[in-house]
Amino acid sequence: MALPPLLVAAVALVRDRRVLMVTARDRDVYYMPGGKIDPGETAAEGAAREAHEEVSLRLDADGLVELFEVRTQAHGEPDGREVHMRVFRAETDADPAASAEVGALHWVTTADADRCPPAGREVLTRLAALDLID
């Protein structure tokens, strides 16, 4: 029996042709600010909530623009378990800051793809295809 996909939402905050990614404490893997969508929550609401929890940004869910959905093998999960990540473009002048959940912030380009799990690599590829990052 197939494992159900992990339904997640993430925020793409782009500045100077780089996108914000984070690392968890004591880990080297870069990932998008985001996480699982809670029951009763829209994907945009989940993305906004996770952005606040992870990078201290207060975003209006109604102001987020969905860019695309990535479907790929979920990092750290059994083979065959997919992540379905809906990625939203965020616009804010506020400066992100690492929360207690996050070890560090990183502004990345496609040159950093080797530091990312499969979903993150796909996000970088798609953001570059949209001419948003290098």
Image: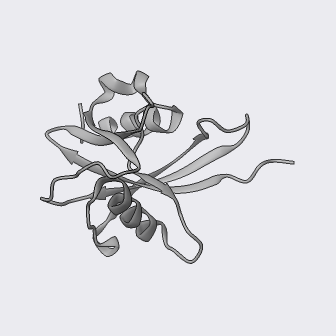
| Residue 125 appears left or right of 74 | left
**Nearest the eye: 115 or 84:** 115
User: x, y percentage for residue 103?
Assistant: 35, 40
Residue 127 placement: quadrant = top left
Q: Quadrant of the C terminus?
A: top left
Task: Name the spot of residue 61 as percent of width and height, x first.
Answer: 34, 72
Question: Is residue 67 toward the left or the right of residue 84 in the image?
Answer: left
Nearer to me, 102 or 112: 102
Residue placed furthest toward the right: 1
Residue 124 percent across, percent down from the top left: 37, 35
In the image, residue 38 sits, relative to residue 125, either above or below, namely: below
Q: Residue at x 16, y 53 (%)?
A: 95
Position of residue 43 relative to residue 13, above or below, is below
Q: Residue at x 22, y 52 (%)?
A: 96
The answer, for residue 131, to whether it is visible in the render is: no
Residue 12 position in % (x across, y down): 32, 50
In the displayed structure, 110 sits above or below 36; it is: above
- Specify the color scheme: one colour
Q: What residue appears at the point 31 percent right and 38 percent down from the top-left corner?
A: 104
For the question of whether residue 126 can be seen, the reply is: yes
**Res. 27 image quadrant:** top left
The residue depicted at 55 percent of the width and 68 percent of the height is 38
Q: From the viewer's perspective, is residue 24 above or below residue 53?
A: above
